[in-house]
Amino acid sequence: MCDEKQLQTWAKDTLSRREFGAFSGAAALAACTPGEANGTDANTSEASGDVTESSVSFETEDGTMDAFFVHPSGGPSPAVIFWPDIASIREAKRNMARRLAGEGYAVLVVNPYYRDVAGEQFADFAAWIAADGFDAESGFALVAPWREKLDADAIGRDTAAIVEWLDGQDAVDTSRGVGAEGYCMGGPFTVWSTAAVPERVKAAASFHGGGLVRGDDPKSPHNMLDQAQAEYLIAVAQDDDAAAPDDKAAFAEAAEAAGRPAVVEVYEGDHGWTVPDSPAYAQAAAEKAFADKLELYARAL
């Protein structure tokens, strides 16, 4: 359902490096609603308004995972696992998590690349595109060896460790289900999360997620829905749908066969439309996606 490389190609073909850097900063600021934190040092633990945030780390079967944790200051809340896109943890993602925490959720933005690197690797999407020169291949080349380790089994192990850590936090209401949301490459991780810990992960929201339908592969996300007990929001980018128009029906049919509630919808935005520092960011469509996600969590968590 997606190809992240088109974001790099789009930026290379249409914007200069300076223009894209300016665009990314302006979009990230625009995504912050009044009163939201905007630039809190992620290496500190501090309260800002009605939320508290900190950098955290914990052990998994594969090493030490680092993450950004933000939650309401007033009491325990349902938890959400936040799987970022290919550029991983950065301020745009922290701001997205802060906004969700302001709606009453304890949000953990995880570093999916922790097996190889810790902490923020790219300040914004422009930095990923320009990782080794403003070049449509460089960002992919850099993350490829990290990314290839992120299969269904690895994400399953990670999810088990994440849920165990979340359930040990005073800020998490363990009587409520856990949500999982993912962007681009993080989209399939949400489905794998629901299959890995079905008794806890009760909602998954994939935004312009890639690789949700992988043919007859038994580890394809759409073929693992019968292992879950969750409800799904599959938000598809319009250009991704044009490239693979049969995928949305295949996922919806698999969900129906598994008896899992799923909304599979094509949004009026291109790949990356929900992410403030993406060149494809489309605010109106992003706001609709955010509202739809809140409706899912209200029902399922």
Image: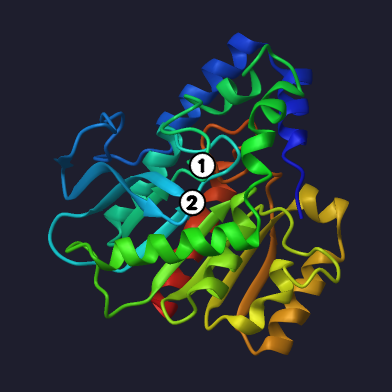
Distance Cα–Cα, label 1 vs label 2: 7 Å
For the residue marked with disc 2, what is the amino acid? Asp
* Quarter of the view holding residue 91: top left
For the residue marked with disc 1, what is the amino acid? Arg
Q: Is 31 left, or right, of 174 in this rendering?
A: right
Residue 115 tag number:
1
Q: Residue at x 31, y 61 (%)?
A: 165
> Residue 61 at x, y = what percent?
45, 57
Which of 36 and 168 lies nearest the eye of the viewer?
A: 168
Which of 11 and 164 lies nearest the eye of the viewer?
A: 164
10 Å crowding of disc 2: few (<14), some (14-19), many (20+) = few
Where disc 1 sits, the SS reads loop
Which of 183 and 284 lies nearest the eye of the viewer?
A: 183
10 Å crowding of disc 1: few (<14), some (14-19), many (20+) = some
Q: Residue at x 44, y 40 (%)?
A: 93
Q: Which residue is mark 2?
A: 62
Q: Residue at x 24, y 40 (%)?
A: 35
Q: Give the quadrant of the C terminus.
A: bottom left
